[in-house]
């Protein structure tokens, strides 16, 4: 019975892979393009990579599909949306983010206007938490200098834009796969740097050893006498052996296709650690003060998403829907101002 269950489980897994083989093949091609196109010459690479790539894609889908939004980010909606009021000081600051992004204006200018009156963007920002002293009601008594927690958001950036929410999420999934490829290249670069550092340290230790041996044999008449105790010499010998062992483990002067494949598999199998997502639910007042005991009936929580990429600070992510007319209107105004300045 156990054998039948294992065979059936294996069959279902293989069937599941075959259903998504086109997506898997596209992802493999993107990874090869970013890392090393010669990986296509690796024998049986599809068999080797299909399952790790699909597992990584499933996690990427989970992360990107879990990002909050879309919220209506029209200027008139700022005062009506708790999320927008929390993230932006005022509607003007929100408008400036959209209006000043050159890539966003270019996307709108080249898009087909008959498709939609809106476009979708991914907003990334950094959440800042500060301890402040403020005023609060404790029962019927107003108290001053009450310790409070204030939430603010800074360094707003537009990560990507698209004509639709589905198109935007697909673009973000491609970006996440690109992050995987860049992580592989970063690991290879770090290993090369480590290898070069070890070679320099090993060369210095060997030079010190040769200098001592020459002095002991009377061949160092042109060099200053350098005295080493037996303990120091033993320590140098031990360090040389240690560095040689590490160098043999990290030496990648001419990495083979197998080495690239091993590094790719290593990153694919650790995607869940490299790319993480957390839901953030905040009960805030109008001053972005975190409420300790919120009234569930009167204060709606601000639902956001925190995305963590290894090697990068955590960022708050939000998908917003913006009317294209608002950005184009600002673009026309900016053009008129530039033309007026040129005439001065």
Image (spheres, rainbow, N blue to C red):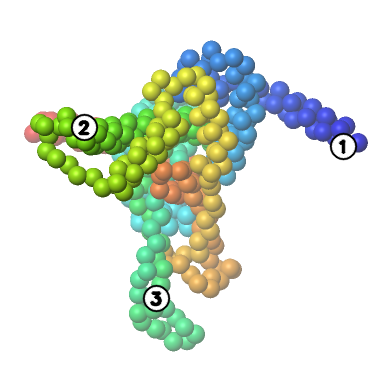
* Marks 2/3: CA–CA distance: 74 Å
Residue 259 in picture, x, y percent from top left? 49, 24
Label drawn at residue 147: 3
Q: Which of 226 and 333 is in front in this view?
A: 226
Vertical comparison of 202 with 278: above or below: above
Residue 310 in picture, x, y percent from top left? 45, 43
Q: Residue furthest right?
A: 1
At x 44%, y 53%, the residue is 84
Q: Earlier in the sequence, mark 3 or mark 1?
A: 1
Q: Earlier in the sequence, mark 2 or mark 3?
A: 3
Q: Which of marks 2 and 1 is nearer the N terminus?
A: 1
Label drawn at residue 2: 1
At x 35%, y 37%, the residue is 240
**In this figure, which residue is indicated by the disc labeled 2?**
217
Q: Is residue 50 at all visible to an observer of this figure?
A: yes
Vertical comparison of 29 with 242: above or below: above
* Marks 3/1: CA–CA distance: 61 Å
Looking at the rendered structure, the secondary structure element under dot 3 is strand
Pair 3/1: label in front: 1
Vertical comparison of 243 with 135: above or below: above
């Amino acid at each position: 019975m156990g054998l039948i269950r294992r065979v059936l489980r294996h069959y279902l897994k293989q069937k599941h892979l075959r259903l998504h083989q086109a997506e898997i093949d596209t992802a493999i091609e993107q990874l090869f393009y970013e890392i090393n196109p010669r990986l296509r010459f690796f024998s049986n690479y599809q068999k080797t990579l299909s399952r790790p790539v699909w597992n990584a894609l499933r996690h990427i889908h989970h992360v990107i599909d879990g990002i909050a939004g879309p919220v209506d980010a029209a200027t008139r909606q700022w005062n009506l949306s708790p999320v927008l009021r929390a993230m932006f000081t005022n509607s003007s600051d929100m408008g400036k983010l959209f209006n000043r992004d050159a890539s966003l204006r270019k996307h709108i200018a080249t898009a087909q206007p008959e498709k939609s009156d809106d476009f979708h963007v991914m907003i990334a920002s950094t959440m800042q938490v500060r301890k402040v002293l403020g005023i609060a009601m404790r029962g019927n008594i107003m108290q001053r200098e009450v310790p409070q927690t204030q939430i603010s958001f800074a360094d707003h950036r537009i990560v990507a834009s698209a004509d639709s929410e589905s198109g935007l999420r697909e673009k973000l999934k491609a970006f996440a796969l690109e992050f995987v490829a860049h992580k592989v290249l970063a690991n290879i670069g770090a290993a090369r740097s480590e290898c070069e550092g070890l070679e320099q340290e090993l060369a210095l230790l060997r030079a010190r050893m040769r200098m001592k041996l020459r002095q002991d044999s009377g061949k160092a008449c042109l060099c200053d006498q350098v005295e080493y105790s037996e303990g120091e010499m033993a320590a140098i010998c031990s360090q040389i052996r240690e560095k040689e062992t590490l160098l043999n483990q990290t030496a990648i002067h001419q990495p083979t296709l197998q080495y690239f494949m091993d590094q790719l598999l290593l990153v694919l199998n650790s995607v869940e650690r490299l790319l993480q997502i957390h839901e953030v639910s905040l009960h805030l007042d109008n001053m972005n003060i975190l409420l300790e005991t919120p009234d569930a009936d009167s204060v709606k929580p601000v639902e956001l998403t925190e995305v963590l990429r290894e090697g990068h600070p955590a960022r708050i992510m939000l998908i917003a829907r913006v009317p294209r007319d608002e950005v184009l209107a600002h673009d026309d105004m900016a053009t008129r101002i530039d033309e007026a300045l040129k005439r001065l």
